[in-house]
Image (cartoon, helix red, strand yellow):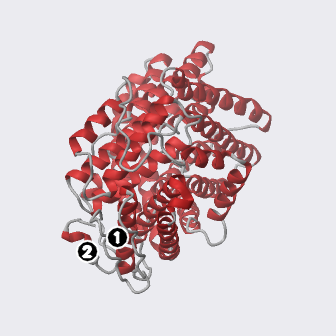
Amino acid sequence: MSDTPSDAAPRPRQPFARGLPLAAPLRLNRPSDTWFKPALSVVAASAVPHLTLLALGRLDLVMYTMAGSLCALYGHGLPYARRARTLAGVVLSMAAGLAAALVTASLTHSTAVLVAVGALLAAAQKAACDAVRIGPPGHVILTFVSSAALFAPQRLGQVPAHLALTLGAGAVAWLVCVGPALIRREGPERRAVARALEAAADRVAEPGPRTRHTAAAAVHAAWQCLLASGRPTPVRRSLERLVVHAEAAGASAHPDQGPDRLRAWAALTRARGPVPEPPPAPGTAAELYGIDAERAALRASGGRRAARRTLLRSLGPGSHLLPVAARTLIGCALAGYLCAALGVGRPYWAIVTAASLYQANTTLTWNRTLQRTLGNLLGVLVFAAVLPLSRTGPLALVLCCLFFSFAAEALITRNYWLGSVAVTPMALLVLEFGGTHPAGELVGDRVLDTVLGALAGFLAAALVTNRRAAGRVERALEAAAQARAAAERAYVDRAHTGPDGLDRARRALTARLVELREAADIAAGEWWQRALPEQRLLAAERAGHRTLAATAQRQGPPVRAPDTRSGAVAPAPANGAA
């Protein structure tokens, strides 16, 4: 493709251990365009049960209702049809983890057993959330609730009532998150398509490998959102046509639409007015080909069975997720036992700290270690400052918790450490609902838990190797090659396969290229593994995007597939689109 010279430059060889950055992980980013949605949702979902318990004089039960209220943090990027199902699953998963913790706490007071169960639950929650790609906040909220419940006084007969409180608060959270569908049914789809248009505009304005990948990922996310959005509506039809334009602009070196036009469409799509009505993209009919057939296939029983098989394979013996789950298990157990050995009565925060560190690779885990440690230590200072205010009365305590819930979600998209500054006092204030504790003891235990949890967690990440990251790259290379070949066959035989077959093949190729880049980025930040096949990665990505460019224009001869085993790169199509 006609990218910058850096597109063809070979990447450096993979080192066994990378240097650890210090300043970069702490830099502030631009806030998410939807930061206010989880922030407002968790406040609304928490306020109803909090104020109800306040009126009843039973604030000691807040821990159980908060478990359900925190489910309001999930699923805000999903279309409402899928969000409803996903949030129901999150509420049930939260209740299941809480039930296991409460039953364990009622049956034993052995710290050794409680730490072991907490580490097992954290590892299982990490693996499950990664497998289903639940998105932020991932497993951390589930682990926070289950770990805290393990060290809370509990009797077996109380468990059903406490779980009922969690499910009731979870139902409120479900209503809060799904309710906006009555006002703006296609809101999540509009935001996803607007991001794709903005990414395509950046790609047109600044051609290069980075913007090319960002545009492909945004287009893929938009298609996935539209596929999961439910039955077609006039608005969704317009959104589909907008994605076609974003896809063509992101794939082609000579797009028909300039960046200003794409950004103008993105602004109108994100706004509350009518969705723009773009002209048909080059070579397409007014209606988009193939997406209805894909939507029907996903909803058919065969499609659901295939999705379940894919999920089970992702958790099978050869899964690339298992080393990260093993890191979580070992790191959480080590953190908990270290804190218990040093006399911390309830070392659940050390378990949560260790569990929160584990990202896709070791380098990202190091970044999160810095962010979590700094944020927690600063958050302890904030807690010490606000504690006298929170103790002026029950209503003040409730309002402080709601404020920090909002602040955490408002700040965390700027950087994780900034959000942790608000999360830490909120978590400590929850303990105040069950009775006051000496401030010095709370602060001292939290500092010790944070430091030991971070040290133990990162030590486990450094020592438990993940050689499967490179194997995932090999599988992604093979899948990308197969998808590219299928797209080229559909292009050659488009008279027989039809435009719907070509469009489905193109969308499948986009998905495989996004997965390939994700696998390569994860492996590049992993330690103690063999060098990555950099030349094959470069050749596969360039050839795949060349095929996308040629088929997006729907003209000119098809692209010949390169032999990625030898690193050869395919020639550009005759029309110069790539």
Q: Quadrant of the N terminus?
A: bottom left
Check the image and report above or below for 21 versus 83: below
Q: Quadrant of the C terminus?
A: bottom left
Q: Which mark is residue 373?
A: none
Element on which disc 1 rests? helix
Check the image and report above or below for 164 versus 544: above
Residue lying farthest top? 55
> 10 Å neighbourhood of mark 1: few (<14), some, or many (≥20)?
many
Q: Position of residue 48 (x, y in %)?
A: 56, 19
Element on which disc 2 rests? helix
Residue at 34% in and 40% down:
32
Q: Are marks 1 and 2 in contact (CB under 8 Å)?
A: yes
Q: Which of the two discs, 1 and 2, labels the residue nearer the N terminus?
A: 2
Q: Position of residue 407 (x, y in %)?
A: 37, 32
Residue at 69% in and 51% down:
304
Q: Label 2 amino acid? A: Ala
| Left or right of 9, for residue 95 | right
- Image quadrant in which you'd find residue 277: top left
The front one of 313 and 299 is: 299
| Left or right of 293, for residue 302 | right
The front one of 400 and 139 is: 139
Q: Which mark is residue 542?
A: 1
Q: Which residue is mark 2?
A: 8
Between the C-alphas of marks 1 and 2, the distance is 9 Å
Check the image and report above or below for 458 versus 201: below
Please say whether residue 275 is visible from this viewpoint. Answer: yes
